[in-house]
Image (spheres, rainbow, N blue to C red):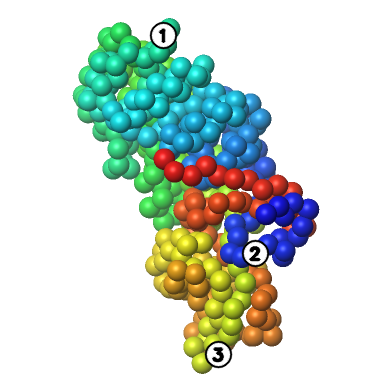
Amino acid sequence: MNYIGKHISALATPAFIVDKEKVEKNCKRMLDLARCNGIHLRGQTKTHKTVEGGIAQTGGSKRKIVTSTLVECEMYADQGFDDILYGFPFIQSHLERVFTLTERLEEFHLMVANLEACQILEQNAPPPDKLWSVFLKVDCGNARAGVWWEDQEAVEIVKFLQGCQHLKFEGIYAHCGNSYAADSVGEVERVRDNSVDMMVRLAGKLREAGLECPNWGVGSTPSCSHASNSFESLTEIHPGNYVFYDNQQVGLGSCGLSDVAGKVLTRVLGHYPKRRQMLVDCGFTAITKQGKGAQRHPAMIAPVDQHPDLMLSNMTQEIGFVEPISSADNIDATLHPVGSLLKLIPYHSCASAACHPVYYVHDSQGIIQEQWTPCRGW
């Protein structure tokens, strides 16, 4: 259904609503950060997975993005984007689709996390007149995919890559996701600076071994949301969540509540004063339960926008339970009549946005300007 031109109050709920001005402001801020440090921004698209969001992240250039799924790569290729990094560890089952993407695009890059992936690529020829362009995934403390930054394994993999007939080494890439475990802005900055130092040292180690390293970058929204001279020693950064931000980022000091662009719109279903609760039409199919136990109240799933005394505290599939944050308070039913609207601030916008087939993009007056359709699947 087309809601363009209507107020968000006309929407069926639950619905994922996006403040367009905030998205544009968030994206411009990150582009400016990269430009001021003389480096590139390779925005991660996995938070929104939309063409429109990708255009905002690239400042309209449609160049230099990183995705988390092949279906994102294919969507962006269809819409004229280029210089796309598939930022997920390559395995053999990806071959047919990455062959097509390499053939179609001027620049398409793969992420390898081990020697086996490199060997598979070398054993399978790329499209004519093309090379497999690869980034090496590096672990700087996130303890997920990639080679440990100071292990000789990294040097040996790059040495193998640079001796291959079918591969081109594009650089090293680290996601400092351990910044999400920080309990202060100072800790976020420490993780960021340590990750930058590790990558710079690894790039130097490769050069000392006679191995060219064209690019080295780090990224996460917490680590890239604070200005730092350390960025100048990189070639690129690759945050992603900043497009929408969320309550987790608020808690990490990445942004303020006023910067959060993506929210879940829901309606009141009924009041239950004996339980000090009201029900809303937003269950776990519309917003993530992530964050329960990690916010300012142990039962909080999501705070209620413009009502700092209320929180979403529990959910079934289609129903949410809203209650006061303070055990001494009750909900004033006259302020929230049945059928009235509330906006929930997701703890994790990536997971919450993924619950919705359409994003309703509105202006500062709540008038829907656009409907964004995210790609789905893998």
Q: Which residue is located at x 53 percent, y 68 percent?
A: 282
**Crowd tier of the residue under label 1, counting other residues whose Cα lies within 10 Å: few below 14, some 14–19, many 20 or above:** few
Amino acid type, mark 1: Pro
Distance from Cα at disc 3 to Cα at disc 2: 26 Å
The label nearer to you, 3 versus 2, is 2
Amino acid type, mark 3: Pro
The tag earlier along the polypeptide, 3 or 2, is: 2
Q: Which residue is located at x 51 percent, y 19 percent?
A: 105
Where does residue 330 sit, x and y in percent of width and height?
57, 87
Distance from Cα at disc 1 to Cα at disc 2: 50 Å
Where does residue 174 sit, x and y in percent of width and height?
38, 34
- Which residue is at the far bottom? 274
The tag earlier along the polypeptide, 1 or 2, is: 2
Distance from Cα at disc 3 to Cα at disc 1: 70 Å
Element assignment for label 1: loop
In the image: residue 308, left or right of residue 352: right
Q: Which residue is mark 3?
A: 273
Q: Which residue is mark 2?
A: 12
**Crowd tier of the residue under label 2, counting other residues whose Cα lies within 10 Å: few below 14, some 14–19, many 20 or above:** few
In the image: residue 205, left or right of residue 192: left
Q: Which residue is mark 1?
A: 128
